[in-house]
Image (cartoon, rainbow, N blue to C red):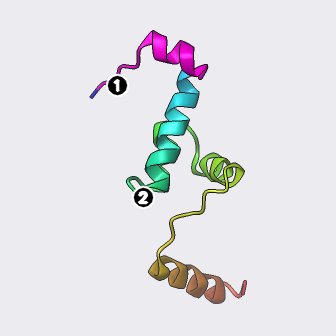
């Protein structure tokens, strides 16, 4: 699928093409429509870069209680907690 954005919109928004992709991916992630990995891919960033962008905008990671429990178990198993 191709996404076509008019030159007029781009001029009015004063965003670069990369900034449009980033903003779109952040919005979709914040609305829990895509995962962090997919958001990073859409924005052309690494997962760590995407996490940094989320932090800049005070957007919290979408972590389920089960994911958090697994992360804590892994940290305990590694003796890091």
In the displayed structure, does residue 53 sit left or right of residue 13?
right
In the displayed structure, does residue 80 sit left or right of residue 8?
right
Q: Residue at x 68, y 50 (%)?
A: 52
Observer-nearest of 78 and 48: 48
Q: Which mark is residue 3?
A: 1
Q: Is residue 35 above or below residue 78?
A: above
Q: Residue at x 40, y 19 (%)?
A: 5
User: What distance separates the C-alpha of mark 2 from that of mark 1?
Assistant: 21 Å
Question: Which quadrant is home to the N terminus?
Answer: top left
Which of the marked residues, 2 or 1, is nearer the chain's N terminus? 1
The magenta segment is 2-15
Q: x%, y% of residue 26?
A: 52, 46
Helix, strand or loop for disc 1: loop
Can residue 44 be spotted in the picture?
no
Q: Which mark is residue 32?
A: 2
Q: x%, y% of residue 58?
A: 67, 56
Q: Is residue 16 above or below residue 42?
A: above
The quarter holding residue 31 reads bottom left
Helix, strand or loop for disc 2: loop
Queried whether the magenta region covers residue 11, the answer comes back as yes
Observer-nearest of 15 and 62: 15
The quarter holding residue 81 reads bottom right
Can residue 81 be spotted in the picture?
yes
Q: x%, y% of residue 40?
A: 52, 45
Q: Is residue 62 above or below residue 66?
A: above
Q: Is residue 70 above or below residue 45?
A: below
Q: Residue at x 57, y 51 (%)?
A: 47
């Amino acid at each position: 699928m191709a996404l076509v954005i008019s030159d007029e919109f781009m001029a009015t928004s004063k965003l670069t093409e990369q900034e449009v992709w980033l903003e779109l991916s952040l919005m979709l992630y914040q609305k829990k429509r895509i995962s962090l990995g997919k958001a990073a891919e859409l924005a052309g960033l690494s997962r760590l870069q995407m996490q940094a962008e989320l932090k800049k905008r005070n957007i919290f990671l979408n972590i389920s209680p089960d994911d958090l429990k697994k992360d804590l178990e892994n940290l305990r198993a590694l003796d890091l907690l």
